[in-house]
Image (cartoon, rainbow, N blue to C red):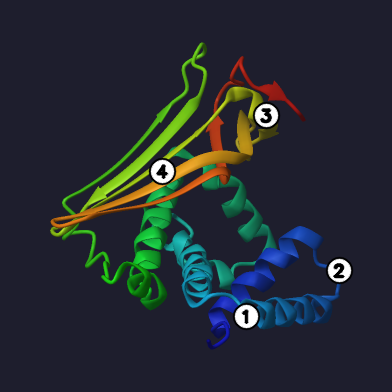
Amino acid sequence: MGGFSEQQRRTLLTMGTLLVGETGCNHSLERAIQAFEQWSTRLEPAACFVLRSVLTAWNLMPLFSRHLSPFATMSPDVAQQFSEGIRDPYRLMVMRIVKGLAGLAFLSEPAIAKRFGLAFALRGMRSCLSVKSEARLPHDAPKFVWQWEAQERDFHLKIECEAEPRHFLGARYITPSGAPRYCHNTKVAAATLTLRTSGAVYRLTTRDSCALEWVLPEAHPAVKQWV
């Protein structure tokens, strides 16, 4: 598999600058990105494709907002502002679409097609008959549940994730506008991906290795606040 494109490398460099700051050590970041890129070439083709798709999607996401420039070309201050504002409701909707596109792109990869003996790909948002996302977080429920599904002309894709409240940790942060937000995170959720076609049903599952996160304006009473 080939490496990252120049824009994907610049996206990683901008992300790295946000993490370590402008210390004059860009050459160290560049070496780290080169090592990461070399490591990524050893991944399965489908995983490498999704990784590059996510980097491209993150770079282009600001074009959906008032920034009107790719992430890779932003100054550190503007990139920080955009990254902190990504949890705004409108950008959350965009992020859900990006995640859906990445999932559908994953299913279209040759390695996955070979495993299933079929190939599936999103032809375009207009050809997708429906896209739906729903979260259920009642205070007294034994489990939190998130579902996402999309209907194409010849297949239906559904992703279901769930985890017990005790497996979540909460983290409070302040948005650029000064409003508090509360993240609810777990790395041990269960997940099921179901692909239905006219002639068959395919299902992939994991019991305790799915990352799941919600952001709410108030802390959920069933989740322990960590920070």
> Of residues 108 and 31, which is closer to you in this image?
108
Percent of width and height locating residue 125: 23, 59
Q: Nearer the viewer, mark 2 or mark 3?
A: 3
- Give yes or no for contact between labels 4 and 2 (Cβ–Cβ under 8 Å): no
Name the quadrant of the C terminus. top right
Q: Which residue is mark 4?
A: 90
- Is tag 4's residue or tag 3's residue first in the polypeptide sequence? 4
Residue 170 has which mark? 3
What kind of residue is marked 1?
Arg
Q: Position of residue 36 (x, y in %)?
A: 70, 76
**Among the two numbered marks 2 and 3 on one chain, the one whose residue lies closer to the N terminus:** 2
Quick check: 122 above or below 10? Answer: above
Q: Look at discs 2 and 1 and give the one toward the viewer.
A: 1
For discs 4 and 1, the disc positioned in front in the rendered view: 1
Left or right, residue 159 beside residue 207: left
Q: Amino acid at mark 4?
A: Tyr
- What crowding class fits label 1: few (fewer than 14 Cα within 10 Å), some (14-19), or many (20 or more)? few
Q: Nearer the viewer, residue 69 or 40?
A: 40
- The picture places residue 134, in percent across and down from the top left corner, at 36, 33
Residue marked by disc 2: 23
Q: Earlier in the sequence, mark 1 or mark 3?
A: 1
Q: Secondary structure at mark 3?
A: strand
Q: Which residue is mark 1?
A: 42
How crowded pointer 3 is (Cα within 10 Å; few <14, some 14-19, many 20+) is rated as many
| Element assignment for label 2 | loop
| Number of numbered labels in the structure image | 4
State the CA–CA distance, disc 4 to disc 3.
Answer: 22 Å
Q: Which badge, 2 or 1, comes first in the chain's sequence?
A: 2
